Image: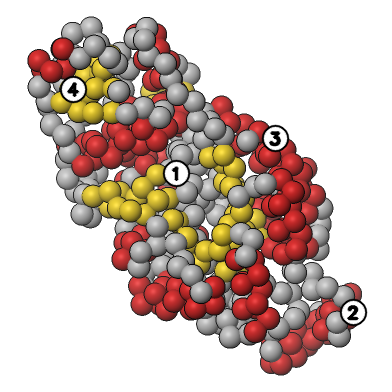
Amino acid sequence: MLLVYTHKTTPRLNYTFKHFFTRILQLEVKFTTKVEKFIAHKGPKITYAKQPLGKEIFVRSTELLFEQGINDIAIRMGTWQGVPCFFISRQEATIPFDIFAATFYLLSRYEEYLPHVKDEYERFPAEESLAFKQGFLEKPLIDIWAYKFRALLVEKFNDFEPQKRPFNYISTIDVDIAFCYRHKGIVRTIGGYLIDLFNLQIGDLWTRTVVLLGFKKDPFDTYDLLVDLQKQYNIPTVFFFLVSEYTTFDKNTSSRNSSYRSLIKSIADYCKVGLHPSYFTMKNEQKLKKEKKRLEEITNRQISASRQHYLRVALPETYQNLVNLEVTEDYSMTYAKHYGFRASTCTPFYFYDLDYEVQTPLKVFPVAVMDGTLRSYQDLSHKRGFEIIMKLAREVQHVEGTFITLFHNDTLSNRGIWRRWKKVYSDMLKQLSQLS
C-alpha cells in the first residue's frame, strides 16, 4: 500500500491517483492529511504538497487537482528521463514536474473543454491537442510516466515489489455498411446500377449482378472470417452495429431487415456486440436512447458498449448522455485522421465529468489505431500500415497496457483501396496473440 500525504483530498486528486497507481501500477493507494500518520508509515510513501516533509519522494503540487471548473492554463514543456513532461516545477523535487496534474490534464481531456477549432465533422481534431503539437501522440505517455515512477519506488523502498499486469489486446469492428450490394432495397439497388452504368464500372456492374443473383458472396460479408479468426487466436473482439435510420452519413442496411437482424444475433452468439450510435447522436440523447433500445430488442440483451459513428464525441455532452442511458463502456477515444493515444494512456479509464467534478461509471477504452486512419487519411500501403500497428503495439507492450484496434468489416473485402488488408488483419491477430 502506498500512502500519500497531501494538504487536501479532492475528487480530482482521488481520480488521478487511482488511475496512476491502482489501474496502471496495480498498487493500492491511500491518502492522509496528518503529518504524524505519514511519518509513522513504514511502507512506500510520497508527499504531494508545496514542501517535502522529509527525505521521501516529493512531488511539488500545482493547483490543478485542488481547483474546480475550467481555466485557461499556460503549459510549459520540459523533459524527464528522456520523455516529454509539463507543469514544470521551479522548486527542487524528486520529479521535476507535477506528474499528477499533467496526468489529470491529459486523462480528463481538459483541453477539449477549452475553446478550439473543430474539424468539418464538429470533432476535436488531433492537430489542436497538446500531444500532437509536442510530438508525443504516438506514445502512452501517462503509462510511461507511471513505470518510471515505479522505478523510483523500487529504488527508494527495498521491500517494495512491483506487480505486473498482462498485456491485453482487444480487436474492435465497426459495421458501418453491413453489405455492399445485398439487402439495400429496390430504390438503392437501382440507384447503384445507374451509378455503375454512368461511371462505366463494368466490373462492379457484373459483381453486383452475380451477388444479387446469389452466385457470389457479398464482398462486405466477412463475418465468418472475422469470427473464425477470433476463435483461432482467442482474441477478445467487439462488434459495433449501426441501427439508425438512413441519412447522408448513416448508410447501413435497415434495422428492420430480417437478414441484418439475423446477422447481429448470430454475431452476438460468439462475440460482444455494442452500439454504433449514428452521426446525429453526438448531442441528441433521445436519438441515442432510441437506437440503444432498438439494438437491445434485436439482441434481446442489455447493451453496455458503444462507439460513436465518425468518432463524433463532444465533451462532456456525448459522455453524459451515455452515462444517463447506463452505457458503461465507450470505445470512441481516438482520432480519425491520426493514430496514437488521444488521452495519452493505453489503460482503460473512467470518464471524469468536469462539469460536475465527479468520476462517472463510464469506462473509456482508448483505441490506438483505425484502419481508415492508415489507409484513407494517411494514404499508407498495407505493409507500412502493418508496421505502424506493430510499432504502437510494442509501445503498449512495454508498459503492459491494453492495445485496441479499430477495423471495419469491409476492410477484409480485399477490394479497391483495401486490397491486401485482409492479410494485414490476420497477420496482426497472429502477432498480437503471441504477445498476450
Q: Disc 4 designates what residue?
A: 5
Quadrant occupied by the N terminus: top left
Mark 4 neighbour class, 10 Å CA radius: few under 14, some 14 to 19, many 20 or more: many
Which structural element holds mark 3? helix
Q: Disc 2 designates what residue?
A: 215
Q: Earlier in the sequence, mark 2 or mark 1?
A: 2
Residue 253 image point, x, y percent: 63, 80
Quadrant occupied by the C terminus: top right
Which structural element holds mark 2? loop
Q: Disc 1 designates what residue?
A: 348
Q: Disc 3 designates what residue?
A: 434
- Between marks 4 and 3, how big is the CA–CA gap? 42 Å
- Between marks 2 and 3, how big is the CA–CA gap? 38 Å
Count of numbered circles on the image: 4
Amino acid tagged 4: Tyr
- Say above or below: 303 vs 291: above
Q: Disc 2, disc 1: CB below 8 Å?
A: no
Which structural element holds mark 4? strand
Q: Earlier in the sequence, mark 4 or mark 1?
A: 4
Q: Earlier in the sequence, mark 3 or mark 1?
A: 1
Q: Is residue 214 left or right of residue 151?
A: right
